[in-house]
Image (cartoon, rainbow, N blue to C red):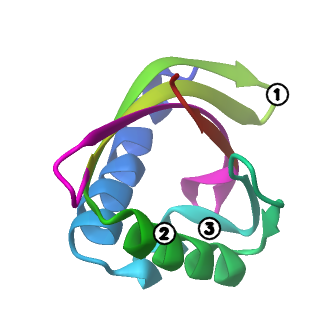
Amino acid sequence: MNPAPAQSEMRGTNRIFEEEVVLKGDFDALDRVYTADARILPPGAEMVSGREAIKGFWKAAVAAMGVTSGKLETVEAETAGDRIIEIGRAQLALGDGSQATVKYVVVWKREDGAWKWHIDVWNANA
């Protein structure tokens, strides 16, 4: 499978995270971002499993860090069987006026006819 046809859909899902979740604080929009049985592996924290738990994580993390905006950029995407593996970077604007840059890997999976984040891991650039 060539990831090129899916890249437009991937960009759309990433925009949901940027615009609806981060900018508007609509954490229910994560239903359209993560698979039902997704897992996230945040830096320095335990793994979080399942969409409802992930919603709680992001709501608390965005508030604690004062994230005011985020921009995701795909660096590379490649197919691995019925999944797509995305390597990317994110730029986050924080409430204190500072910026945080992170790198991430997302394993994408089709669910309900849409490409969604199934495994999400990231860490900050030093």
Inter-mark Cα distance, 2 to 3? 10 Å
Amino acid carrying mark 2 in the image: Arg
Residue matched to label 2? 32
**First in residue order: circle 2 vs circle 1:** 2
The residue positioned 58% from the left and 28% from the top of the image is: 86
Position of 37 with respect to 21 (left or right) is right
Query: Of 7 and 14, which appears nearest the observer?
Result: 14
Question: What is the magenta range?
Answer: 94-119
Inter-mark Cα distance, 1 to 3? 18 Å
Residue matched to label 1? 81
Residue matched to label 3? 112
Amino acid carrying mark 3 in the image: Asp
Q: Quadrant of residue 25?
A: bottom left
The residue positioned 57% from the left and 78% from the top of the image is: 55
Residue 89 in the image: state x and y as whole percent: 44, 28
Queried whether the magenta region covers residue 65, the answer comes back as no
Residue 36 in the image: state x and y as whole percent: 72, 73
**First in residue order: circle 2 vs circle 3:** 2
Residue 85 in the image: state x and y as whole percent: 67, 28
Inter-mark Cα distance, 2 to 1? 22 Å
Amino acid carrying mark 1 in the image: Gly
Quadrant holding the N terminus: top right
